[in-house]
Image (cartoon, rainbow, N blue to C red):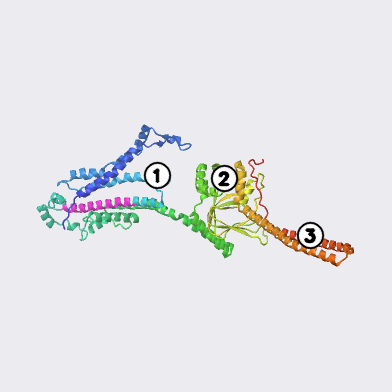
């Protein structure tokens, strides 16, 4: 087997091009730092400190701190080594190869890594995160880990080639003509006839083949020679070296079988330290980013488990347990574990107002009563709206219970019904849909100038017919808005409130229905009396004629007395009949008129 060492011209050009692009970014980074302002340490006693923008002070501070490290990281060392140093040192008289010079290029990654990690810390300090998404942060840390594996694999390959050539040189020193042996190791002599004769007669390559029984110990570099990594094409060679570096960093170099060569053991120690540090830092950060995706889900699972244990401990019946589970599940689907009130409470008042306006203004404008108000008053109402969730079958409020909030429906359906205080034979029901509202009794209470602290009682029972998402306006907030903004009191709002209030609509319908029934009764009674009066008059006339013919004139007085008695009895019967009709009318169920709020423009103090 004959072998030699050379550098690939194509790879030299590609590496030079790619490395120059990377160096340009480092050069731009160096220039930008000369123009980057800083905060004076002496001004950090209170607040964020004073920003120094003087170019001379910035340059002086930068030169005293990280300037030289940035210069070392920016230097085009690979280009210098590949195109100038290696060609200048290669000659037939040299007794060494230039693989060790390439390690200088890899050592430049030390200051570059020193720049990468502080830069990441500065990004996190300034923005809070490196990337906006958890997957992006995980990919960023994985990329840095792969970069470290790339550097480690490249270093291992260069050291493997160096150990291979070291074995050749140690055997060449035992040859009769060592200088010629050294020169024949260069691939530039491949076509030399004497080199071919030497390759067929020498034992240099056989005595450095790890497949044979040799004295030279390759240690951790044996696989590079044994698996012919050093003699393969670039793509398989690169991926094998990358895999080797990734494997050793992940296992902290535990599977390395080293020799007693000091450089090899030092390299193995460096692998173990790098693997421990990078795995704990980068992979730890990557795991943190990935866990942040499911942290809300884990919190919800823990809360659900605690809820189940509490229900089991309190021995709740199964129907209540199912209702609790349904609500917890619906709340998770609607909010994904995010507490909106906590987030909004932490924001400035102006920003919170704008967000609430964006979320609630269109919904509040759907309420006809609020559509009559100006933007300032609507902003005050939107600012105090809170999110509310209800599951199927939940009673929002029952008839007779105190009303604690007005509810503006975003999605879902509610059933609003009333029995007029539980009276027999009375029932009214309507369906509330997105854009509707309930709890208008609270509005009447809030508009009263001297309303008591006792909340009004609900005149209707409101029940969820599906999962309902809504905004709620609490009693104290509505009272605050009504007291602060006198423009809420106006006659125009009174008519709007009466027209769209379900309570007033129900009362108006019942009032019109009762009036119509009374009208129909009066018309029926009048028609009946007309029908009865006509035949009775005709009968009276005919009877009077018959009586005059049958009885003489002397009997008129007795007949008059008889007619008078009949008239008295008829009037008593009519009076009793009227009292009975009035009693029946009073027994009919009546719906009381809704409480009338004070819509005057100036409320009394």
- Do callouts 3 and 1 mark residues in contact (Cβ within 8 Å)? no
Q: x, y (%) of residue 576? A: 78, 61
Q: x, y (%) of residue 280? A: 38, 52
Mark 2 burial class by Cα count in 10 Å: few <14, some 14-19, many 20+: some
State yes or no: residue 172 in magenta: yes
- SS at mark 1 in the image: helix
Sequence-first tag of 3 and 1: 1
Q: How far, Cα to Cα, is label 3 from label 1?
A: 97 Å
Mark 3 burial class by Cα count in 10 Å: few <14, some 14-19, many 20+: few
Q: x, y (%) of residue 296? A: 47, 55
Q: Which is more toward the observer, 389 or 300? A: 389
Residue located farthest toward the right when viewing the structure as drawn: 554
Residue located farthest toward the left when viewing the structure as drawn: 193
- Do callouts 2 and 3 mark residues in contact (Cβ within 8 Å)? no
Look at the image and tell me in which quarter the N terminus lies.
bottom left
- Relative side of 337 to 257, left or right: right
Residue ID for mark 2: 372
Q: x, y (%) of residue 306? A: 53, 59
Q: Which mark lies nearer to you, 1 or 2?
A: 2
Sequence-first tag of 2 and 3: 2
Q: Is residue 100 visible?
A: no
Residue ID for mark 3: 575
Q: Is residue 425 visible?
A: yes
- Relative side of 34 to 214, left or right: right
Residue ID for mark 1: 123
State yes or no: residue 434 in magenta: no
* Residue segment shown in magenta: 145-173
């Amino acid at each position: 087997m004959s072998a030699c060492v050379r550098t690939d011209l194509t790879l030299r050009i590609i590496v030079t091009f790619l490395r120059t692009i990377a160096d340009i970014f480092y050069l731009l980074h160096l220039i930008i730092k000369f123009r980057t302002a800083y905060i004076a340490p002496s001004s950090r006693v209170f607040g964020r400190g004073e920003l120094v923008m003087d170019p001379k002070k910035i340059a002086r501070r930068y030169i005293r701190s990280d300037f030289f490290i940035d210069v070392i990281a920016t230097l085009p060392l690979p280009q210098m080594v590949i195109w100038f140093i290696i060609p200048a040192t290669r000659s037939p008289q040299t007794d060494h190869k230039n693989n060790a010079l390439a390690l200088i290029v890899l050592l430049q990654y030390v200051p570059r890594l020193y720049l990468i990690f502080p830069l990441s810390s500065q990004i996190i300090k300034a923005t809070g995160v490196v990337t906006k998404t958890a997957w992006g942060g995980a990919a960023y840390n994985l990329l840095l880990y792969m970069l470290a594996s790339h550097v480690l694999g490249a270093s291992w390959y260069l050291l493997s080639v160096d150990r291979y050539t070291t074995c050749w040189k140690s055997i060449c020193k035992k040859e009769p003509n060592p200088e010629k042996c050294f020169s024949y190791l260069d691939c530039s002599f491949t076509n030399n006839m004497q080199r071919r004769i030497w390759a067929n007669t020498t034992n240099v390559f056989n005595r450095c083949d790890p497949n044979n029984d040799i004295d030279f110990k390759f240690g951790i570099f044996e696989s590079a020679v044994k698996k012919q990594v050093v003699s393969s094409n670039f793509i398989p060679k690169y991926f094998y070296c990358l895999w080797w570096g990734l494997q050793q960093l992940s296992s902290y170099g535990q599977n390395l079988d080293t020799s007693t060569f000091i450089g090899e053991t030092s390299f193995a120690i460096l692998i173990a330290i790098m693997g421990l540090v990078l795995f704990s830092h980068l992979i730890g950060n990557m795991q943190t980013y990935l866990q942040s995706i499911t942290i809300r889900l884990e919190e919800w699972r823990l809360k659900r488990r605690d809820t189940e244990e509490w229900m089991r401990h309190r021995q709740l019946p199964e129907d209540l347990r199912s209702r609790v589970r349904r609500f917890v599940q619906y709340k998770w689907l609607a909010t994904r574990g995010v507490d909106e009130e906590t987030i909004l409470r932490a924001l400035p008042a102006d920003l919170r107002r704008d967000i609430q306006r964006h979320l609630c203004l269109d919904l509040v404008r759907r309420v006809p009563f609020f559509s009559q108000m100006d933007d300032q008053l609507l902003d005050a109402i939107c600012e105090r709206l809170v999110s509310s969730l209800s599951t199927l079958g939940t009673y929002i409020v029952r008839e007779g219970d105190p009303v604690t909030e007005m509810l503006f429906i975003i999605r879902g359906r509610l059933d609003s019904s009333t029995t007029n205080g539980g009276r027999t034979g009375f029932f009214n029901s309507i369906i509330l849909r997105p854009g509707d509202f309930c709890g208008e009794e609270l509005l009447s209470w809030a508009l009263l100038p001297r309303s008591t602290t006792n909340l009004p009682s609900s005149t209707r029972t409101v029940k969820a017919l599906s999962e309902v998402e809504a905004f709620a306006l609490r009693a104290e907030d509505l009272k605050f808005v009504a007291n602060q903004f006198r423009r809420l009191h106006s006659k125009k709002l009174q008519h709007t409130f009466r027209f769209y209030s379900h309570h007033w609509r129900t009362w108006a319908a019942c009032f019109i229905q009762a009036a119509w029934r009374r009208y129909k009764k009066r018309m029926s009674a009048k028609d009946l009396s007309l029908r009865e009066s006509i035949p009775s008059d005709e009968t009276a006339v005919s009877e009077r004629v018959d009586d005059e013919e049958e009885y003489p004139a002397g009997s008129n007085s007795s007949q008059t007395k008889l007619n008078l008695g009949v008239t008295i009895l008829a009037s008593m019967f009519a009076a009793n009949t009227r009292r009975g009709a009035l009693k029946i009318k009073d027994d009919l169920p009546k719906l009381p008129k809704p409480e009338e709020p004070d819509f005057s423009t100036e409320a009394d103090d």
